[in-house]
C-alpha cells in the first residue's frame, strides 16, 4: 500500500534482522581552516530515521556525501560525522574509510541487529560527483551497472532514502537502487514533503510568501507556479527580489543597486517581474521605502526620493510596518530570504523586525534557505518556526513544479 504522497513510509516495512541501506544527507558546512564541522543541523535531522530503523532491529548501513568537486575544501572524510551521530544516538556508529570496496563489503556483512555503519564519503567515487551526473547523464536503469550500485545492491534487503535536500540530484545513490530493492522514504523526507504540501496544496488562508535575500533566482524559480496555482494570497518581496520588482515597475534604483542586479545575472528576471505585476499586482508587494548608508549611519528614503548614488541595503520603516501587518493577519507563512544585509547591524532592522513578527504570529510557518535559517537564528528563536527545511536546490525545484528525480524513483519503484 502506498501512502504519504505516493511514497512508502518505513512504518510499512519489516526491517528486523534485515540489511537496510539508508541514504542520508549529512553534508555540513566546514570550517576552511580547521576542516571541522561548524553546523550539524542536517546530522541532527537524520537521527529519527536512524534511531527508528535500529530500534526495529535493522542492520543499518548509511551512505552520504560531503562536499563536491565544486566545493573541494568541504570534500572530506565522514569520520567526524560518525562521531557526531554516535553522540546523538547514544550508541556506537561504526565507520570505515571505504565506500564500496572489499573492506566496506566485509563490514556490511558483519553487522548485527540494531547496529549502525557509516561508509565513507560518496563523493570519493567519480560517479557520485555532480560533474559526472551533469556530463554523463545516466538513466536510473543505466545506473544499475555503475560501481556503487553493482557492489552494494546485492548485499541489502531494503533501501531507504531520507535525503530530501539532495532530491534534485540524479546520482546513483539517489535513484539507482530503487529498481533493485524495495524502497521507502525516511522520516525527514516525508516531513519535508508534508510541510511543503501544506503551504502549496491546501494552505490555511490567508497564505503569505516572504521572498527576499540576494539569491533572486530562487524566488523567480517558484513565483510563477505559486501564482498559477493561487497558492499565495500575498507575496511580500524584499532584498534583491524586491529591487527587481521595483525596477520592473519603472522605479530607478540608481547605478550601484541596478549594477549589482545586472552583475549577478538577474536582469533577465525584470521582464518576468513586469508580467507578474501586470497580472497579479494585488498579490505582489514590493518595498515602499528603503534604507542605505549615509556617513556610516542608517538613512531611509521613500521611492520618490531615492539616493541614486547609494547602494540600497534594507527595507525602510514604512515597509516594515506594512509587512508586519500582513504577517499578523496570515495563517500560513513561507519565508525564503532575509529583507536586507542582516550580517551588519546598520542593515538588519528589516530582517529582525519581520522575523520577530513571524515568531509572534499564530500562523503555520515554514522556512527554507540557508540565509533564512541563519538570520532567523540570529534575531529570534528558530524553535518558533513550525518547520525548517534542510533543502536548498530541492526546495526551490519542488516549489517551482520541476521534477525531483528522487521522488519519481521512489514512486516508480517495484
Image: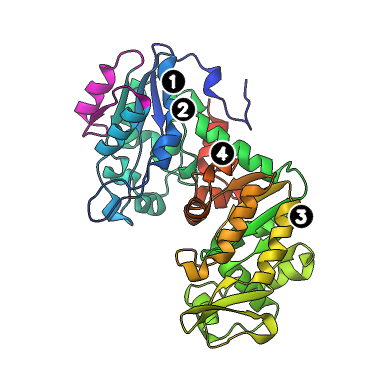
Q: Where is residue 353 in the image (x, y as percent from the top left)?
A: 60, 60
What is the spatial separation of the Cα atoms under label 4 and label 1, in whole angstroms?
19 Å
Q: What stretch is highlighted in magenta?
A: 89-114
Q: Where is residue 361 in the image (x, y as percent from the top left)?
A: 68, 48
Mark 3 / mark 1, whichever is N-terminal: 1
What is the spatial separation of the Cα atoms under label 3 and label 2, in whole angstroms?
34 Å
Asked whether disc 4 touches disc 1, contact meaning CB atoms under 8 Å apart, the reply is no
Provide the secondary structure element on which disc 2 rests. helix
Q: Mark 2 points at which residue?
A: 48
Foreground of the two, 198 or 2: 198
Q: Name the residue under label 1.
A: 53
Q: Can residue 141 be seen in this view?
A: no
Mark 2 / mark 4, whichever is N-terminal: 2
Mark 3 / mark 2, whichever is N-terminal: 2
Q: Mark 3 points at which residue?
A: 233
Q: Name the residue under label 4.
A: 192
Foreground of the two, 307 or 237: 307
Rendered view: 22 above or below 277: above
Other residues around mark 2 within 10 Å, as few (<14) / some (14–19) / many (≥20): few
What is the spatial separation of the Cα atoms under label 3 and label 1, in whole angstroms?
41 Å
Mark 4 / mark 3, whichever is N-terminal: 4
Which residue is located at x 32 percent, y 51 percent?
68
Mark 4 / mark 1, whichever is N-terminal: 1
Nearest to viewer (mark 1 / mark 2): 2
Q: Where is residue 357 in the image (x, y as percent from the top left)?
A: 64, 54
Q: In this view, does 379 lie to the left or right of 58?
A: right
Which residue is located at x 37 percent, y 51 percent?
130
Which quarter of the figure has residue 312?
A: bottom right
Which residue is located at x 37 percent, y 44 percent?
27
Provide the secondary structure element on which disc 3 rests. loop
Task: Based on the picture, tell me whether residue 71 belongs to the magenta stretch.
Answer: no
Provide the secondary structure element on which disc 1 rests. helix
Amino acid at each position: 500500500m502506498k501512502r504519504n504522497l505516493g511514497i512508502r513510509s518505513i512504518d510499512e516495512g519489516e526491517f528486523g534482522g534485515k540489511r537496510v541501506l539508508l541514504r542520508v544527507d549529512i553534508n555540513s558546512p566546514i570550517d576552511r581552516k580547521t576542516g571541522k564541522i561548524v553546523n550539524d543541523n542536517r546530522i541532527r535531522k537524520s537521527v529519527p530515521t536512524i534511531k527508528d530503523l535500529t530500534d526495529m532491529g535493522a542492520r543499518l548501513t548509511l551512505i552520504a556525501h560531503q562536499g563536491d568537486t565544486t566545493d573541494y575544501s568541504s570534500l572530506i572524510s565522514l569520520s567526524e560525522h560518525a562521531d557526531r551521530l554516535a553522540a546523538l544516538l547514544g550508541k556506537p556508529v561504526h565507520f570505515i574509510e571505504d565506500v564500496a570496496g572489499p573492506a566496506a563489503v566485509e563490514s556490511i556483512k558483519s553487522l548485527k541487529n540494531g547496529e549502525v555503519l557509516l561508509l565513507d564519503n560518496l563523493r570519493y567515487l567519480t560517479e557520485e560527483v555532480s560533474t559526472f551526473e551533469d556530463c554523463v547523464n545516466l538513466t536510473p536503469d543505466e545506473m544499475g551497472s555503475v560501481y556503487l550500485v553493482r557492489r552494494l545492491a546485492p548485499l541489502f534487503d531494503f533501501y531507504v532514502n531520507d535525503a530530501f535536500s539532495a532530491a534534485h540530484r540524479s546520482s546513483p545513490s539517489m535513484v539507482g537502487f530503487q529498481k533493485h530493492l524495495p524502497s521507502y522514504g525516511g522520516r525527514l523526507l516525508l516531513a519535508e514533503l508534508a510541510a511543503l504540501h501544506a503551504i502549496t496544496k491546501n494552505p490555511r488562508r490567508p497564505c503569505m510568501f516572504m521572498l527576499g535575500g540576494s539569491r533572486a533566482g530562487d524566488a523567480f524559480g517558484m513565483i510563477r507556479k505559486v501564482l498559477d496555482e493561487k497558492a499565495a494570497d500575498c507575496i511580500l518581496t524584499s532584498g534583491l527580489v524586491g529591487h527587481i520588482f521595483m525596477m520592473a515597475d519603472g522605479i530607478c534604483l540608481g547605478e550601484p543597486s541596478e549594477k549589482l542586479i545586472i552583475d549577478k545575472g538577474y536582469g533577465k528576471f525584470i521582464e518576468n517581474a513586469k508580467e507578474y505585476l501586470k497580472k497579479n499586482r494585488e498579490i505582489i508587494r514590493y518595498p515602499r521605502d528603503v534604507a542605505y548608508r549615509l556617513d556610516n549611519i542608517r538613512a531611509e528614503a521613500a521611492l520618490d526620493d531615492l539616493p541614486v548614488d547609494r547602494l540600497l541595503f534594507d527595507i525602510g520603516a514604512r515597509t516594515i510596518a506594512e509587512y508586519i501587518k500582513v504577517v499578523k493577519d496570515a495563517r500560513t507563512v513561507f519565508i525564503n530570504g532575509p529583507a536586507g544585509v542582516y550580517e551588519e547591524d546598520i542593515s538588519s532592522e528589516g530582517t529582525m523586525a519581520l522575523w520577530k513578527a513571524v515568531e509572534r504570529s499564530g500562523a503555520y510557518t515554514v522556512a527554507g534557505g540557508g540565509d533564512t535559517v541563519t538570520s532567523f537564528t540570529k534575531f529570534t528563536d528558530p524553535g518558533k518556526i513550525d518547520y525548517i527545511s534542510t533543502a536548498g536546490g530541492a526546495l526551490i525545484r519542488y516549489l517551482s513544479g520541476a521534477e525531483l528525480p528522487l521522488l519519481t524513483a521512489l514512486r516508480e519503484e517495484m
